[in-house]
Amino acid sequence: MIDTDAALAALSLEDKCRLLAGKTTWRTKAFPHAGIPEVKMSDGPNGVRGEGHGGSSTPGVVVPSGITLGASWDPALLTEIGELLGTEARRKGAHILLGPTVNIHRTPVGGRTFECYSEDPELSGILAAAYVRGVQSKDVAVTVKHFVCNDTEMDRMSVDVQVDDRPLREIYLRPFERAVKEGGAWGIMSAYNRLGAEHCAENRGLLTDILRDEWGFDGFVVSDWFGVHHTVEAANAGLNIEMPAPVRVYGTKLVEAVKAGEVDEEQVDRLVLDVLAMINRVRADEFVVTDEEQSVDDPAERAVTRRAAIGGTVLLRNEQASGPAVLPFDPATITSIAVIGPNAVTNQCMGGGSASLTPFNHRTLLAALTERLGPGSPTDATIIFEPGVRTDRLTPLLRGGQLRQPNGAPGLLLEYMNGRTWDGEVLVEDVSPTSLVRFFGSIPAGIDPRAFAVRITGEFIPDTDGTHQVGVVSTGPVKVVAGGGQGATVIVDDPDAELPRSQEFFGYGSIEVIETIDCTAGVPVPLHILWRTVAENGFAAIRVGIRSAEPVDLMDRAVTAAAAADVAVVMVGTNDEWETEGFDRTTMDLPGRQDELVRRVCAANPRTAVIVNAGSPVTMDWATGSDGAPAVLTSFFAGQEQAEALVDVLLGVADPGGRLPLTIPARLDDHPARANQGTTEGMYGKPVQRYEEGLDVGYRGYEHRGIAPRFPFGHGLSYGTASWGAPAADRTSVSAADPAVTVTVPIAATGDRAVTVVVQGYVAAIDPKVERPAKVLQAFAKLVIEPGAEATATLAFDGRAFARWDSAGAEWVVDRGEYDLVIAASATDERSRVRITIT
């Protein structure tokens, strides 16, 4: 532990102002003379990426994405996941994990919906607090993000979010409040966007008045990367750390602001003391930053992530017009299985952007099903795979056995050199296992981050004859040549990075340039890539994708395979090109012809299970109604053990434990924020997004407008059955000063299988003069009950469950009158009510 007062006294003004800014993309600056060590941060929140670069990212544990964890409705599980990630952070030498993400699922097409827990603030906040406690139990700090209203990716760096005080307090701030008050969060990350015309990183009302003075937060606030713009405003607001380097706002500019009297040195001292307190909390003087990152593949940790994936897998539908339910499959009745859909062979276990990392080896759904049911297994079934459709937004990346270095080994050879030309001395050699090379602010030792170039060489092995499209997206100058000799084709030649920019790579990538080449199956095609960085922002990347011609009978083959099999499994969804940080989706529809594929396969085989592998809601006209798919389940993006968990659920080895953490609308136009989803031009030409739906977020809005969703918030089925007894409240008359109520609900398992039950408790005001939504989730309990057993669900409605924000008085108030505590299995599946009176 460092003596914070002594350390502060040992720092000059210049030192203090420099401490408040990053030294690199992921580290703060050390001051040895004051005993202050370097601190390292790492992206999360569904893993710990570390400082990997190019092709050398350190593999790590990938836990389920936020939406899957939200679907678990299981705070104890979130604590376990947090503990695992705290351990992983230590292995990566990181003191701070940049997560969890607790922004609200305000729209179903937000680019980072998969990162966040829920559309409901209480569910989000309870789970976030549990995650925070788990991570910080390992002496690793969190930064709960993004504070606040970074709920879409539209113009995220500049948009001015305009939201009334009441929804701001009751919905958007609430998860952060729980994470601070109940989780004890040591860190907060400010959002990119503005709130009421002020950038969140420079908003004193947020960072000091609410966060510190009202909630009692005693930690540090770090900016989102490049998310702070003005020195005086940020310092006086209470922003502790500007990230990343190079310093743009603090450092020398902050020194000048202090000398000019625009920022008091006492305020700088307060900011520094918060940073020093964090250093002690994470024991940075004991856990010294090194360049060695450990990669530990622990079977016990795989088991935790598998259990978490099962806990967040939601069985949406399981019925047939006649006969028993399709799921779980009985291996004894299966001799052949048709596995269909492109996601069945890719295992899309996470979304794109800063939440992505290199996972440990993990199997696809096809591989997991083949191992469990295929030839050589006790079932010894025939497994037939057909992709059915293509869904890529960009030309597909090359991986594994498709790539070969000049020496014949797998991958592509990377040769690094300093300078801005491609003919310099090679200083570092590396290997990339894929045709995507990217840098999240980290580069090999000895390479100049401001000016370096890379030569990438190797070859790819086509698996089909005919024409192939080669596509390139780059953040910097690039030249790509495919083929050799007289047959070489220049795919792109952009030495000055003059290609138009696109939304790829956070908006820094070029448009995709595509050229066509002829290939012969099995005949290697040389690849020669010259690429240079212009990484002023710390991020740089290049991707080369190759797409073969699509067979005309691709879908017909899939339908034929399904018709001939005993059962069919169709895995449809999106990938990290469709769902990623940097932009929102424009539609809920599945990419490509996947909807048609599902309909035709289900028509061909009545024993079909459809898996939706997407990080946020998709349109599923085929999922409901008398002619809907027999069985539908979603794991969202469920981490590295996703395939194993799905097979456990398909075979009934495990019960699907998830319940929807958001509403799935029947169509995009139904969602409550649809009319206010985009941005408009505000004052001085700045983009504005108005949250005019107010409190009508998620299930509240559907109920208020009388619109039936495709699947409601909180919905999910179990393989078991249960009966719910009458609820009982510990008191039915309470005072406004102390309105807390506890309700117990007896539950009995009535079938021959264990049953998963999530009992949800909503508060509904009876007096129409009380201005509240029709009902609001305020408590829940998750139970797993063995066959023939009984259990009691306990729902604790605390005092805040009955409070609303009074904007006029700027305070929480409890209105007197009658309230119903609605006991439900989902937002539309009410089981009973308990009437209480607040006097």
Image (spheres, rainbow, N blue to C red):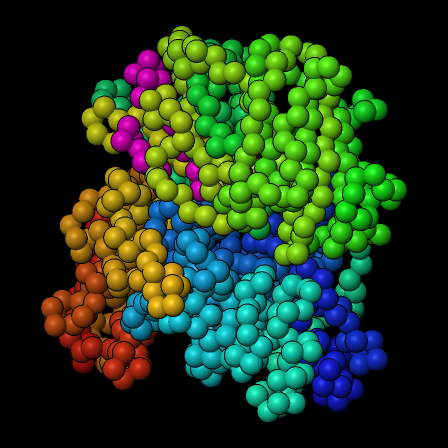
Decide which of 333, 483 is in the foreground and name it.
483
Q: Residue at x 43, y 56 (%)?
A: 155
In what quadrant of the picture does the C terminus appear? bottom left
| Residue 339 appears in the rendering | no
Instruction: Give left or right: position of 81 versus 29.
Output: left
**Of residues 650 and 41, the one drawn nearer to the viewer in this rendering:** 41
For the point 22% across and 60% down, the residue is: 775
Is residue 602 found inside the magenta-colored segment of the image?
A: yes
Q: x%, y% of residue 18?
A: 71, 76
Image spot of residue 793 (x, y percent): 34, 56
Asked which quadrant contains residue 765, the reply is bottom left
Q: Residue furthest left?
A: 768
Quadrant of residue 563 within the rendered picture: top left
User: Is 627 drawn above or below residue 266 in the view shown?
Assistant: above
Q: Is residue 341 visible?
A: yes
Q: Is residue 831 magenta?
A: no
Asked if residue 276 is positioned above or below residue 615 in the image, the reply reads below
Residue 13 percent location from the top left of the image: 72, 86
* Residue in view at x 62 percent, y 73 percent: 249
Residue toward you, 139 or 556: 556
Magenta region: 599-623
From the top left corner, tell me how far across and down residue 589 is, in percent. 34, 35
Q: Nearer the viewer, residue 260 or 525?
A: 260
Horizontal relation, residue 246 to residue 563: left or right: right
Residue pictured at 40% horizontal, 64% vertical: 686
Q: Quadrant of residue 558?
A: top left
35 w.r.t. 745: above or below: below
